[in-house]
Image (cartoon, rainbow, N blue to C red):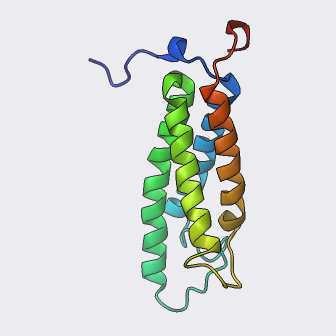
Amino acid sequence: MTLLPPSTNEHYRGAIVSAWFLMAAGAFEFAPGCIHYFLPDGGAGVIAGLDLSGDAKTIVRVFAWMGALQMPFGALLFLIGLRYRNLVPIGLLVVAASRGLMSVDAWLLKGAGSDHHPPEHFASPVATILALAFLAMSLREQPVATR
């Protein structure tokens, strides 16, 4: 047995652009994960603009923890889009769910009424809509020539 089983791309019948979008989503998950994990402040101050004068160590550790989750998740999404395309719909569903939950939290729950919104709060609703659109395309069987 090897680490990576054989590719399942020949079984995928959806739009190839959906697989490409999933790979892009994986890269856009991986890159912030690296920032959160490797940047000295995790991006909390220099990117998100958070006030670190309170409990900076805890904030930075939480950002690093998030980065530690984002990097492997992003790599998995990329791998699915590259080699295991029959899993593209479920990958897109997970992206839509995670970004949708982030959006609800940022704009309607814990972040509601806040004057401060980091860049991700603006990107997540867009990513949710895009992931749902590409999910729909991944579920529609495409002619052989366009796969």
At 51% from the left edge and 31% from the top edge, which residue is drawn? 79
Number of numbered labels in the structure image? 0
* Residue nearer the viewer, 12 or 9: 12
In the image, is residue 20 above or below residue 118? above
Residue 91 in percent (x, y) is at 52, 38
Residue 118 in percent (x, y) is at 67, 72
Relative to residue 7, is residue 138 drawn left or right?
Answer: right
In the image, is residue 59 above or below residue 20? below
Tell me if I can see residue 20 in this picture. no
Relative to residue 98, is residue 143 drawn left or right?
Answer: right
* Residue nearer the viewer, 8 or 132: 132
Q: Which residue is situated farthest in the bottom direction here?
A: 54
Relative to residue 4, is residue 49 drawn left or right?
Answer: right
Q: Which residue is situated farthest in the top direction here?
A: 145
In the image, is residue 83 above or below residue 32? above
Tell me if I can see residue 104 in this picture. yes
Identify the image quadrant of the C terminus: top right
In the image, is residue 18 above or below residue 83? below
Q: Quadrant of residue 139?
A: top right
At 59% from the left edge and 57% from the top edge, which residue is drawn? 100
Residue 1 in percent (x, y) is at 26, 17
Residue 95 in percent (x, y) is at 56, 47
At 70% from the left edge and 28% from the top edge, which residue is drawn? 17
Q: Quadrant of residue 39?
A: bottom right
At 62% from the left edge and 43% from the top edge, which residue is drawn? 25
Q: Which residue is situated farthest in the left direction here?
A: 1
